[in-house]
Amino acid sequence: MIAGFIDSWALFHDAYLAGWLIGVLLSLVGVFVVARDQIFIGAAVSQASLFGIAVGIWSGSMLGSAGWWSSELFHAVTGGLFAVLAAFVTACAAHRGGRETPEAVTGWVFLVSTSGSILLMSHNRLGMEEINRLLSSTIIGANRQDVWIFLGLTVLTGLVLSLKYRSVVLIALEPEMARVAGLRVGLWNGLLSAWLGLVIGFAIHVSGVVYAFASLVLPALIAKNLGRTARSLFFLAPCTSLGTGVIAFVLANHYDFPPGQTAAACLCTLLAGAWLFRAVRPR
């Protein structure tokens, strides 16, 4: 099994590295999503990114196939923009309140994005194949450029967390206390929402919806059940994502399974074990 994975390294090493970096990056961002009990926002933002990619493909088909708007970069940008917009909409609903609950707004974003992406691509065979590819969560097509992009995003996220750890954690967990401490909570929430949308948007274009959403919420949930302090979550979540990702990719290569779904299944199994551990752990 290990030998087979090593043999496949020369052909798929960019996909493996990109997948592991995506997992680590999203697990760090996912700590804030889980800490705020906004897990469904991750699903809504993921679907919004898919909708943005569909809009990019549809726009390219309307404008012609010879321009830059038909490139994968343009599709990734539109996916990222829609993800950022969805993150802002759901964040505003959660923090400002209104006639509708945050769950209602998040559900609306999820359903509009899911139905919209299918409807836009219903008469575009190639576009529908791309949407189905992203829904099926394949990362085999990742390239060296993707590796460098996610390496940069991961390093930048880790650097900001290390430099602004206390402020970011206080704003995420105790926003009222952060206001009393003089922090600009509204600005920080906007930046966190924008970063959430950006990283999900780029991740989905490479890894698909299933793997991106699983990497966003499952490692953080596992860390939440195993860790005892907020600081430990930022260590346990990326370590869990990376360790599980390595095992999942080895299994996927050996049994010829889709790597994204294999990683999601492994994380789900590990979360069930974490729930059991928490239930029997001495208080």
Image (cartoon, rainbow, N blue to C red):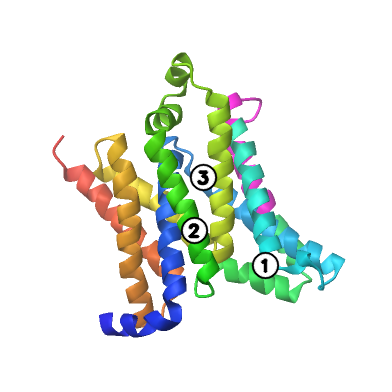
Q: CA distance from mark 3 to mark 2?
A: 24 Å
Where does the image place residue 118, in percent across and percent down from the top left? 70, 63
Q: Secondary structure at mark 2?
A: helix
Furthest-top residue in view? Answer: 180
Q: Give the side of residue 155 with respect to residue 73, left or right.
A: left
Label for residue 72?
A: 1
What residue is shown at x 37% (from left), y 39% (from top)? 162
Q: Is residue 210 magenta?
A: no
Q: Nearer the viewer, mark 3 or mark 1?
A: 1
Q: Residue sitting at 79 percent across and 66 percent down?
A: 60
Read off the residue under disc 2: 150
Q: Answer few, some or many: residues within 10 Å of disc 1's Cα (few below 14, many 20 plus, some between 14 and 19).
A: some
Instruction: Determine the residue positioned at 27% across, 84% down.
Output: 3
Instruction: Give me the C-alpha separation between circle 2 and circle 1.
Output: 16 Å
Q: Which residue is mark 3?
A: 40
Three-letter amino acid code at disc 1?
A: Glu
Query: How many other residues sit within 10 Å of disc 2, few (<14), some (14-19) or many (≥20)?
Result: many
Eyeballing the image, is 36 above or below 115?
above
Helix, strand or loop for disc 1:
helix
Q: Which residues are magenta?
A: 93-113
Q: Which tag, 3 or 2, sits closer to the chain's start?
A: 3
N-term-proximal mark, 2 vs 1: 1
For marks 3 and 1 on the same chain, the one whose residue lies earlier in the sequence: 3
> Looking at the image, is 113 positioned above or below residue 232?
below
User: What's the CA distance linking mark 3 and mark 1?
Assistant: 27 Å
Disc 2 residue type? Phe
Towards the viewer: 143 or 231:
143
The image shows residue 236 at horizontal and vertical percentages of 29, 48
Q: Pointer 3: residues within 10 angstroms few (<14), some, or many (20+)?
A: some
